[in-house]
Image: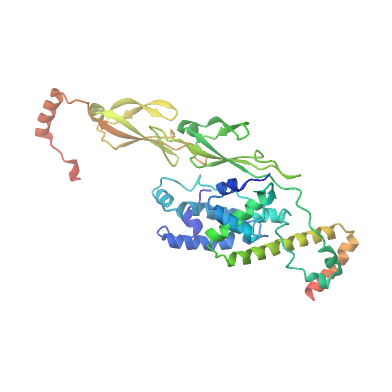
Amino acid sequence: MAKDPYEVLGVAKTASADEIKKAFRKLVKQLHPDLHPGEKKLGDRFKDVASAYDIVGDEAKRAKFDKGEIDAAGQERPEQRFYREYANSGGARHYQSNAGFEDLGDVSDLFSDLFGRSSAAGANMPGRNVHYRLDVDFITAALGGQQRITLPDGKQLGVTIPEGVADGQTLRLKGLGHPGRGQGPAGDALIEIHVRPHAVFERKGDDVVSELAVTIDEAVLGGKVEALAISGRVMVTIPKGSSSGQTLRLKGKGLKGKRGAFGDQLIRLKIVLPKAIDEELETFMKAWRESHAYNPRAE
Amino acid sequence: MTISEEDLVREVSVLTVQRLHSWIRLGWVRPERREGAAHFHDVDVARVRLLCDLEHELELDEDTVPLILSLLDQIHGLRNELRSVAVAIDEQPPAVRDRIASAYRRIAEG
């Protein structure tokens, strides 16, 4: 899901934590699948609400979301099997009570016959999902690839990391969870991806942000220098008269987004002076200052 | 496939051992007992999650939870019986089904 969590919860971006909690609780009452055993379509909406609250119901995450450091995508909750699924498939008979219709035996001989019997345990039950956590390095997450995980029973599982996978995103491997009971289908393996931070790159939505050190002469005169992109080394052009903090945008050199389009790479320039200031530079600067003083703080 | 008490508490993040024990004591959760240990089936795990939602996310108090739980158990009991009755009727020859259907309409509308 990539819906705006505020919109999903129906609150303003400025809502207090209390208002958000209230709105959430109201929606849980309306949408919790277990409080509405027969309404099939509630599951998805409830999941959206729960995912939204996972973000904005948590002060730290909400602050990050508001600053754009995380987005609503990739915060998806792993699929949950609600109680009603077991109850509806006859798997919860030992919890169910006949108290609600014992009296029907009085109006129907058939019913009083039938409800005297003891119930059989549910024979066909779907298997449980298994959750794993997989650490992936930044470049593998960006470019996609194969990675193996070792299961608790020693078996190995090959996982295809999709291009541009985000930190916290969950991959689902159908049928690789626990086996089902009887004719029940096996559960799924749910793999939560954790992307390790990178020394140079940082992810911002589908864009990749990095910093590039340039010399004072490159900043003044411009020029072509080598920079690191996620796909390898690239040549970038430093415009004449660049300042620290100025950003170069490499179109399409970012991460593959949800809709298949690629983000950009944003390279922030940082002017680095030589380790030691030599006499020649000092003399030149003194002379230059006499006739070309400027004040960038005045703007 | 069952999981142990420790695994259950680890898997359901808001759950504490104290809470779980009191639910078992109250009969709200009924794990299988084998060799002195509790074994939780998938259905027990789902029920524990439901209880967590009721107590934690809806902040219902301890008196309201059993009320809801009991109503839910009755609804599920009814739904299961209704489903069995429906399947049993479906297995009848068309003439019998028709007779049941018209009797049903007469009673339900009368």
Left or right: where A116 falls relative to A169: right
Left or right: where A168 falls relative to A120: left
Q: Residue at x 41, y 61 (%)?
A: A16
Residue that lies at the very extreme toward the front in this rendered image: B36
Q: Is residue B44 above or below residue A290?
A: below
Q: Residue at x 88, y 66 (%)?
A: B99
User: In terms of depth relative to the viewer, which is nearer, A230 or B50?
Assistant: B50
Residue that lies at the very extreme toward the bottom in this rendered image: B110
Q: Residue at x 51, y 44 (%)?
A: A74
Residue A18 location, x and y as percent? 44, 62
Residue A56 location, x and y as percent? 45, 54
Quarter occupied by the C terminus of chain A: top left
Left or right: where A185 falls relative to A212: right
User: In terms of depth relative to the viewer, which is nearer, A207 or A140?
Assistant: A140
The image quarter in which residue B51 lies: bottom right
Q: Residue at x 75, y 51 (%)?
A: A122
Residue A94 location, x and y as percent? 72, 57
Q: Is residue B87 visible?
A: yes
Q: Which colour style is shown?
A: rainbow
User: In terms of depth relative to the viewer, which is nearer, A43 or A196?
Assistant: A196
Q: Is residue B35 above or below residue B50?
A: above
Q: Is residue A45 visible?
A: no
Residue A160 location, x and y as percent? 57, 33
Looking at the image, how many numbered discs can be counted on the residues? 0
